[in-house]
Image: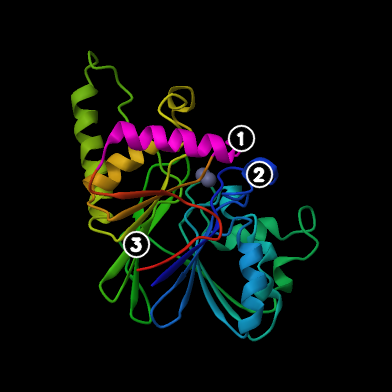
Amino acid sequence: MKIKFWGVRGSIPSPGPNTQRYGGNTTCIEVRTDDNELIILDGGTGIFPLAQQLLKELPLTANIFNTHSHWDHIQGLPFFIPIFIPGNTVNLYGAFDPISGAGPERIMNIQMQYSYFPVREAEIQSRMNYLTVMPHEVIKIGNTTITPTLLSHPVVNLGYRIECNGKSMFFTGDHEPHYNIYEPQDDGYADYQALIDEQRQAIVDAMQGVDVLIADSSYTVGEYPSRKGWGHGTFDSCIEMAKAASAKILYCTHHEPTRSDDDLEKVFAEAVARQNCKTVDIRIAREGDEITI
Ligand SMILES: [Zn+2]
Ligand SMILES: [Zn+2]
């Protein structure tokens, strides 16, 4: 299985000299299975340069798995050029959205209307399939399995475990570790803590033993308190999660748009030193980086 990063930035694209080394595109990861099936995790702006690359191998079947419908994970989808070329098949997998009651079709319907985009969804030329997936449902693409898991974010966010020929990876999308909303002296504290412990364990179980874990490490521990509840993790929480799940390699991703390359390396190094974790190979996700497992 081959994994390539096309977008590693969170929230909003951040081009410019300060982000040149790690890249400014929002979330998009290309996964090639051993049978060369194409899986794409999220359609942030990184999917646009990926689409340019894919024009060399048409017709294609693209399996896009969307973690959730926030802009930085969908805004590149209308620019995924293969959707405008007949003969291609694009399968868009995503969660049921409890706010709108819709599945992943809404991601395209809402963006591809004249108010926001010059081409309507109805004008898509490829075969476009919208597939609503549920947590724990096992999806098969060739001999690869994809299993969604519910993570913690202000909207339904599915993390995906991908397994092929004994190798595995897990991508969180956006995830903030569950936290107790009660104070220790409150009546509900203990019960709520038991629930959180269960939820945290279920997530660690879902990513148990993966070769590669790609996780939302937007913030430093110092930044986190003022951003609690925004739905993102820290470098430290990701390292702890990777350790608990016995992941072999951790890629920290969803970099803060205001974080320069130099700052990113600095806060990353501080977290790695603080955690002193010997069992996980911890890396910063960088646009253009590729790994074969
Ligand atoms: Zn995001
Ligand atoms: Zn989000």
Mark 2 surroundings: few (<14), some (14-19) or many (≥20) residues within 10 A: many
Please tell me which residue is depicted at 59% across the width and 51% down the height of the picture.
Answer: 26
Q: Does mark 3 have its CB less than 8 Å from ligand 1?
A: no
Query: Sequence-wise, which precedes: disc 3 or disc 2?
Result: 2
Quadrant that contains the N terminus: bottom left
**Residue on which disc 2 sits:** 14
Q: Is residue 273 magenta?
A: yes
Count of marks, rendered view:
3
Q: Main secondary structure of the magenta part?
A: helix
Please tell me which residue is depicted at 61% across the width and 86% down the height of the picture.
Answer: 59
Determine the CA span between mark 1 and mark 2.
8 Å
Q: Which residues are magenta?
A: 256-277
**Residue on which disc 1 sits:** 258
Mark 1 surroundings: few (<14), some (14-19) or many (≥20) residues within 10 A: some
Please tell me which residue is depicted at 79% across the width and 53% down the height of the picture.
Answer: 115
Secondary structure under the numbered disc 3 in the rendered image: strand
Q: Are marks 1 and 2 in contact (CB under 8 Å)?
A: yes
**Residue on which disc 3 sits:** 169
Determine the CA span between mark 3 and mark 2.
27 Å
